[in-house]
Image: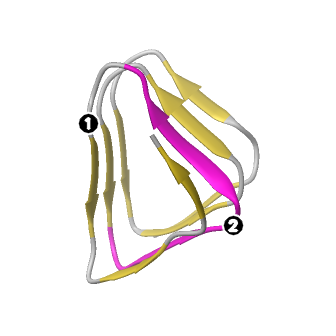
Amino acid sequence: MNININNPLEVAGETVLTGNININTAVKAFENITLNGEVKNTNNSVIFSKYGDIVIDSSNVNLNGLVY
C-alpha cells in the first residue's frame, strides 16, 4: 500500500502506518508513532510524539527532517 501524507496529521492516540510511506509534512501523535514498510521518504518533515516512542521498522529508510 502506498501512503502519501501531504497535509499535517495530528492524532490524539497512537499512529501506525504500514506500507510505502511518503511524508511531506508534519506528523504528530500524543502516543506512539510506528512506521512499518519498505520505504520512508521524508522531505523536510517533522515526526513528533508528545508522550510516546517513534519506531521505524524498515530495511530502507530515507529521512530528511526532524524526528522528535
Name the residue type under label 1.
Asp
On the image, the x and y values in percent for residue 42 come to: 60, 65
Disc assigned to residue 14: none
Check if residue 57 falls in the magenta segment.
no
Q: Nearer the viewer, residue 62 or 6?
A: 62
Q: Which residue is mark 1?
A: 53
Give the spatial CA distance, label 1 vs label 2.
21 Å
- Image quarter (top left, top right, bottom left or bottom right) of the N terminus: bottom left
Disc 1 and disc 2 in contact, CB within 8 angstroms:
no
Q: In the image, residue 10 lies at what x, y percent?
A: 58, 26
Verify whether residue 46 appears in magenta.
Answer: yes
Image side of residue 50 versus residue 10, left or right: left
Residue farthest along the top direction in this orientation: 12
Stretch of the chain drawn in magenta: 37-50
Residue at 71% x, 49% y: name it.
Answer: 25
Magenta stretch: helix, strand or loop mostly: strand
Residue at position x 60%, y 46% in the image:
46
Q: How many marks?
A: 2
Q: Of 18 and 57, which appears nearest the observer?
A: 57
* Element type where label 2 sits in the image: loop
Residue 58: x and y in percent read: 27, 74
Identify the image quadrant of the C terminus: top left
For label 1, the SS is loop
Q: Residues within 10 Å of mark 1 (few under 14, many from 20)?
A: some
Number of residues whose C-alpha sits closer than 10 Å to that of mark 2, classed few (under 14), some (14–19) or many (20 or more): some
**Amino acid type, label 2:** Asn
Reading the image, the residue beneath label 2 is 43
Residue 41, relative to residue 53: is it above or below? below
What residue occupies the far right of the structure in this picture? 7
Q: Earlier in the sequence, mark 1 or mark 2?
A: 2
Q: How is the image coloured?
A: secondary structure
Q: Residue at left 26%, top 83%?
A: 59
